[in-house]
Image: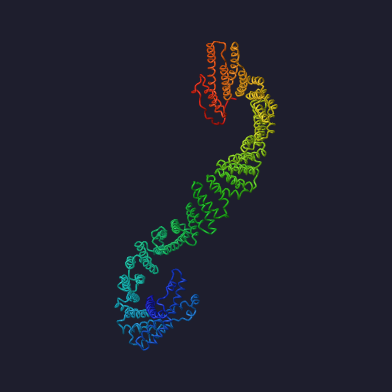
Amino acid sequence: MRIMKRDVFKILSWTVLAMVVAATLAVTGPVYAQSGKNTAPKDVADELKMKAGDEEGNELKALKAELLISQSDQKALEQLNKLILKYKGSGLEASLHFRLAELYMRRAKTATFFEVHRDDSTAVRFSPKETKSSTSKAWVQKAVNTYDLIETKFIQFTDMDLVLFNNAFARQLLGQDDEAMRRYKKVIDDYPNSPLVPDSHLSLGEELFLKKKFQAAYDEFQKIREFPESRVYPYGIYKGAWALYNIGRTAEALKQLEEVVGYSKKPLEENPNRLDLSHEALDDMVVFYEDVKQPGDAVSYFRTQGGDERAGELSLKLGKIYQRHGKFGNLEVVYTDLISAVPLAAERPEMHHDMMDGYENTKNRDKVIANLETLSDLCQDTSAWHKAQKLDDQKECWTQLEETGRLYSTKWHKEYRAKGDVALGKLTSRAYESLLKNNQKLKGDEDHICFAYAELLFEQGVFRKASEQYSRTAHLTKDLKIRHDSSYSAIVSLEKATNDKWSDVDERTFAILAQDYITLNPKGQYVTDVRFKKAFIAYEKNHYDEAAPQLRDLAVNFYSNPRGLKASSLYLDVLNIQKKYELLRDESKMFLTKFKSDPETTAQLTKIHQQAFLTVNQNLENSGQYIEAMNGYLGFVKENPQSQLADKALYNAIHCATLGNDLGMSSKLSEQLIVTYPHSVYKLELGRSLVILYEAQAQLSKASDSLLNVAEWERAEVKDPKDKTEKSNYAALILAAADYKALDNDVRGATVLYNKLIERNPKSKEGITALERIEAYSEKGNDWHKTSRLLEQMVGAGVQPQASIAMNKIVQHSVEERDDDKSFRLAKKVIAMRNDDNVSRRALAQSRLVQARILEKEFIATSIKAKPERLSLVLAIKSEKLDRAQKAYQDVIGFKDKPSAIEALIHLAKCYENFSGSLSQIEAPADAPVADQKKFLQEIENLALPIEEKNAETLQIALKQAKDLQLRDDTVLRIQMELDRLSKRGKKGFSSNVIAPPANILPIVAHGGAS
């Protein structure tokens, strides 16, 4: 006989205890009132509020709450006992005893709590007395005693039905079932209108059910139907269904469960206090269904009763029953229908699992793999099913997949190896793939699964896919042996797949697999072979970024053998191809210093290193980083002072210093190169550059010394001094060196060099220039004897314009000595040079001007005072003197030296004025008739007038040329004043409109003139 699996006391106990709590609170109210408190403190309520997830904290809060309730109950008991004494014999006494019994039951509940926690260290530590001494039965017994007192002493108590019911419930707790049943019956018999009648029927039915008196229990449960408004109404029907089931009336039992479910669907307002047992009823329907209905109707039935949200769960439970009973066909029908009708049911993974078990048992492996693949698809994050599930259901899917996938892939693979069945091998591959679609969700030995799958593929000859799977395993596993075998097998599988016909894609794949093997197995058996092959292939395929680090590592670790040397050569070649010159410089240096090489290899590495070193610096220079480039070149020189490229590097450093405006460093480095590398091809160029550098730094003495060095180096380069095609700038360089010393106020040093030039090249351009320089020094020193000797030496050299200039200086000195004859004579020597090439026009003009002024003096000194009979002769002499002076001044003008020409015009005008003035002083013969006298004076005036006009005309020309020349002295002003003076005289032939007003004379920088 089958019995009910639920305990009614659990439900009823909560009902009664709720009543006890209400009674307790009703009694404890006055206690708070007596202590001056109307409500429990808010902070206490907050403190005791439970928090989700804080299990330990919530346990402690429950303990505190029970202690507070216990303390409150104790105060209530004390208060009630006082009230009972106070109202003894009154109408309130029975009610007070009833309240007391309820408080005892409340204390029993608290005692039960402490009994449960008696072994809890926290409870013992927090409240040791209550935890150790609490006994719930003692309190229940006190309640029973109190209820008995009311039954016997207060027979007319208005709530006697409640006393009887509670007493019965309390006695059940004490195991006094017969006494309890008697009281339940008494409630039914004596108080037919009591609301506790249905509860009493329920309690009687439960007792009969426990005693396996199912028909009697059913009859008792059915009586509850008379009370449809009762809270326990659905429970009575539910228990009646189980009673029917136990007496074999399953179809009726199923109907009653349907009634329970239907009752729960009624609007809540019809009976807000009813019990909702629909969940329990639906669960139990599954048990009943198997006996009375067909599997093909199950899904539709459960969807009707429980809706889609419960259909999956109920169908799964039914399937499990079929599975236990060996009815796989029924299971298949139910699960297949459910999956079709409710595809998002959370229970699907377990259903697929169960169906796979059934199919495997019947050797229907096509359906096994179909369900496994379907399950794998369900579990994917992107599937509609997965997105619709809760997290726990998603995890359950992977649990089911992992369990079934492992089972069938392992089992079938073993069978495949034993039999070699090709079809089974394909199914096994599908099983592995279904399991490994999303391998990060697997737990445990997934690396073994991956490796096994790779082995299966290799065994089947699917090498490329096997290579991929081996590689995946190598990255997944932590097992060193599997890692080694799988990473190397990935390489072997790829080699078999390509059959030695490598595409670019296969080459790249090989490189990746090889690197994986090396990285994952640094001490692997085949590391060296794999590394060399991988690196050389990458180099040959121009995959330099991949090849470089590999070749370097091989070179460093295997430098002592030929393959290591080859790797080093290829590595440096890669750096050169990639134009990574800094790295090429450093790495070649590393090979030179860290490893021992044969002479040939050392020479090759040295050459590579030095060329890379220079290239790095050249790149810095080309990018405008001159200081960095300079330091780099100097670093090269310091590191390789004996290199054939050392002077080149130092030369480039000098160039960078110059471009970087560090002239001091450029000079210093130039001197260093000249001294350190005296045979450098850059020596002469740097010597010349030093001159410019020192001049820019105002170090003129050093500039002079550099020029002297350059002069000697240039002369040394002339192989045959007699060969006119080979020219040397020796004299010019010496002259320039002397000039630098002169500018640096080193007169003595300059003079030595000037004299050296004069001695060796007296008639050369440089020699004459040296004479000029020395002569200039002599002039400054007021040593005319020495100066005249030098000037005569220059004249004697006959080199123009120096010779004419020197002779003119001698002429001018003679003028200063006021020796007109000597001056005139010496001036002739200058004039005699007029046809020489490059003669100084200034010297010619100035010397001729000296002669003109001497002739002018003679002209002015000639008087025309004479007796009438001699007047004609005197005028003729005066005119002749004028002609000679005029001719000389015209010669001066003809030499085209403008300053000299202006001076000549001014003096020529004075000559004209003197002549016209002399004519105006002639008197008529005193003894001549008056008419003749007038006629005589008129003739004299007619003779003077053209000369006066010539005077003004000449001054006008002088004024214009002076203005054009922008003379900065007072020449223009003097000419203008002279013209103004002539205008004021008002002589005939002059008019004011030809006299220009004085012009503003502005200072100018310089004036020109032929020299």
* Residue 915 on image: x %, y %: 57, 18
Q: Nearer the viewer, residue 114 or 833?
A: 833
Tell me the quarter of the image containing the N terminus: bottom left
Query: Is the residue 841 above or below the residue 293 in the image?
Result: above
Q: Nearer the viewer, residue 727 or 703?
A: 703
* Residue 598 on image: x %, y %: 65, 44
Query: Is the residue 900 above or below the residue 317 in the image?
Result: above
Q: Is residue 866 left or right of residue 130?
A: right
Q: Is residue 796 left or right of residue 219?
A: right
Q: Quadrant of residue 626?
A: top right
Q: Quadrant of residue 239?
A: bottom left
Tell me the quarter of the image containing the C terminus: top right
Figure coloring: rainbow
Q: Nearer the viewer, residue 228 or 822?
A: 822
Query: Is the residue 81 above or below the residue 941 in the image?
Result: below
* Residue 984 on image: x %, y %: 52, 23
* Residue 265 on image: x %, y %: 31, 70
